[in-house]
Every structure is written in structure tokens, then in C-alpha cells.
Amino acid sequence: MLAGAVFCARSTAVRASGQGRQIDIVAKRFAFEPSEITVKKGESVTLSITSEDVDHGLAIEELGVRAEVKKGESANIPLTAESEGTFSGKCAHFCGRGHGTMTLTVHVVE
């Protein structure tokens, strides 16, 4: 089972912090950058998502993640994956004609 919460920041960097790793993700029409991330099972990470152009969202149902990010703002999403696998996320706020192709893949490894 996986547990998640919601928050965010700007860039596509991965950096260590006192409370685990932070993975910066940029949301813009019609993509998350990076579009794939890998975390270790049991590792506490923060997904820091920044919206560059319009309101966006992120939903990864199997991980319990649901977030809204307003244009020009950030949200931080704490995440600790308890199961291995590949999980698909998608934009959870309609952002235009390419909205349906805006996805984020999370790989959870041992």
C-alpha cells in the first residue's frame, strides 16, 4: 500500500533534504517534466510541483495522491510508497485540448 499527500516547487531536479528527497516537477501544457520518476519502496520523498502556465492538478489514485496547483504556484506532496510497481498519474484539472495526454509515471523499486 502507498501513502501520499499534496504540496510542490519548481524545476526538474532531485535533491536531498532533512526530511528525505525532494523531486521537483514542472507542470505545463500538456506535460509533467520529468514525465517519469523512480522512488524506492519505503522512501519518504516530497513531490514539489510548479504550474508554469495555467491551473493543473495531479492525481495518482493508487498512491492516494490528489493535488491542485494554481498558475504560477507550487504544491508539495509527501509520498512514501509501501509497494513496488508502476503507477500512472494524470493531470486532475482540465487544462486544454491536450489534457488527456498529460501523465506522470511513478516507478517504485526495492
Image: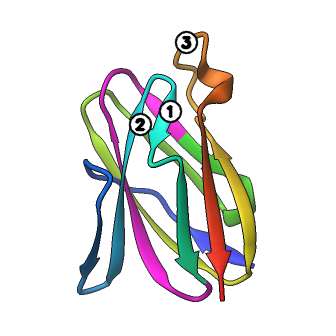
Q: Residue 31 carries which label?
A: 1
Residue 46 percent coordinates (x, y): 40, 68
Q: In which quarter of the image is the N terminus?
A: bottom right
Residue corresponding to mark 3: 96
Q: Which three-letter amino acid code belongs to the residue tagged 2?
A: Ala
Spatial CA span between label 1 and label 3: 12 Å
Q: Does the magenta stretch include residue 50?
A: yes
Please tell me whether mark 3 sits on a helix, a strand or a loop. loop
Q: Quadrant of the C terminus?
A: bottom right
Q: Quadrant of residue 36?
A: bottom right
Q: Which three-letter amino acid code belongs to the residue tagged 3?
A: Gly
Residue 57 percent coordinates (x, y): 51, 37
Spatial CA span between label 2 and label 3: 13 Å
Residue 25 percent coordinates (x, y): 38, 50
Could you tell which of marks 2 and 3 lies nearer the N-terminus? 2
Which region is colored magenta?
Answer: 41-57
Residue corresponding to mark 2: 27
Query: Which of label 1 and label 3 is nearer to you?
Result: 1
Left/right of residue 29 with respect to residue 48 in the rendered view: right
Q: Does the magenta stretch include residue 8?
A: no
